[in-house]
Amino acid sequence: MRTPRIAILCGANLWHVDDLLRAAKLRDIRLEIADPEKLRAECPSAEGSSPAVRCGGLELTEFDGLVVRSLPGGSLEQVIYRMDALQALQSAGVAVINPPKALEAAVDKYLCLCRLQEAGLPVPRTLVCEDPQEAMKAFAELKEQAVLKPLFGSEGRGILRPRSSEEARKAFEEIASARGVFYLQEFIDHGGADLRLLVIDGQVTASMARTAPPGEWLTNIARGGSAESLEAGAALENLALRAAAAVGAEIAGVDIIQGPDGAPRILEVNAIPGWRAISEVSGKDISLAVLDYVLARTTERETEPAGAFQP
């Protein structure tokens, strides 16, 4: 059997990329690096020819697998084009992980929450609007106990918890000046802790509990939070598996909080999850587990015909 050709779609200087390259050495395979900002797609004029997607000297359409590790922000046109290019690769038979539709659903907090709610999963009450006056009404409906989040974002960046209507008004004015969207979610007192469950191929590979720094409420490791290994139990693992399936993610980080009554609620599903902290506290080689899954998925290219491109 030939060695699969696998590329990582990523920016420069990312820990997860370096760790995947380390894991690749253990499996004696080579991983190529593709810059998401240098993709070039082509729809050939010749009848019967397939679309091509290149990145530098790499003809990605000829690869067996593509691991998406970063998708930088940009204009609406840039973001849509990159997703279209990933869809073209998937339609050409490349195992894109995670699939474009999963990336689209997970990166949009509102769409992700809708997918979870439609699947019958517990989520916090959330109100989304564009008008500042409607945002103030939503803040009042949530009894001024709300978390204000950017629609797109990760690692806790841009998240606010207004403590009064005046603080909320100022935050809304700033968002309105940037033509943003108001995404308000009820604040649930989680005691300064939440849970991250990492799902790979329909199984919870590792779990951790994250704790906010003293005096803070955000638990993100990037914001100074700490982590410890967690035995999540069957009920929480089942929620995580259903959440990943709801957005179509093959590899996912599922964030869950528990209120004072112990009832769990799913905050979001991350389709490009970090795993540095969870790997350290669980003692599991997550990069190797990810790579092994990708290698298993690439064998499908040899047995399944490529489909027609569908935007």
Image (spheres, rainbow, N blue to C red):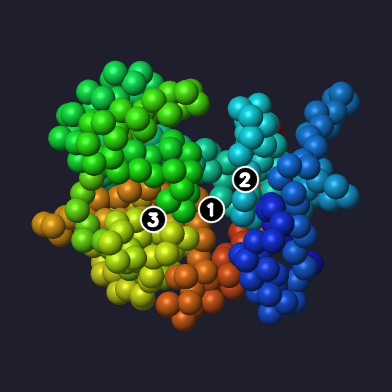
Other-residue count near label 2 (Cα within 10 Å), few / some / many at <14 / 14–19 / ≥20 = some
Instruction: Indicate the position of residue 289 as horizontal and vertical percent values.
Output: 55, 71
Image height of 172 relative to 28, above or below: above
Is residue 182 or residue 6 the one in the foreground? 182
Other-residue count near label 1 (Cα within 10 Å), few / some / many at <14 / 14–19 / ≥20 = many
Query: Which quadrant would residue 143 be assigned to in this image?
Result: top left
Q: Secondary structure at mark 1?
A: loop
Query: Which quadrant would residue 127 be assigned to in this image?
Result: top left
Residue type marked 3:
Val
Q: Secondary structure at mark 2?
A: loop
Residue bearing mark 3: 254
Q: Tell me the quarter of the image containing the C terminus.
A: top right
Q: Is residue 180 left or right of residue 6?
A: left
Image height of 186 relative to 175, above or below: below
| Label 3 to label 2: alpha-carbon separation | 19 Å
Residue at 65 percent across and 61 percent down: it is 14
Image height of 150 relative to 180, above or below: below
Q: Secondary structure at mark 3?
A: strand
Instruction: Indicate the position of residue 100 as horizontal and vertical percent values.
Output: 58, 41
Residue type marked 2:
Leu
| Label 3 to label 1: alpha-carbon separation | 11 Å
Give whichever of discs 1 and 2 has the lower sequence position.
2
| Label 1 to label 2: alpha-carbon separation | 9 Å
Is residue 296 among the parts visible in the rendering?
no
Residue 272 tag number:
1
Q: Is residue 267 left or right of residue 306?
A: left
Labelled pair 1, 2 in contact (Cβ < 8 Å):
yes
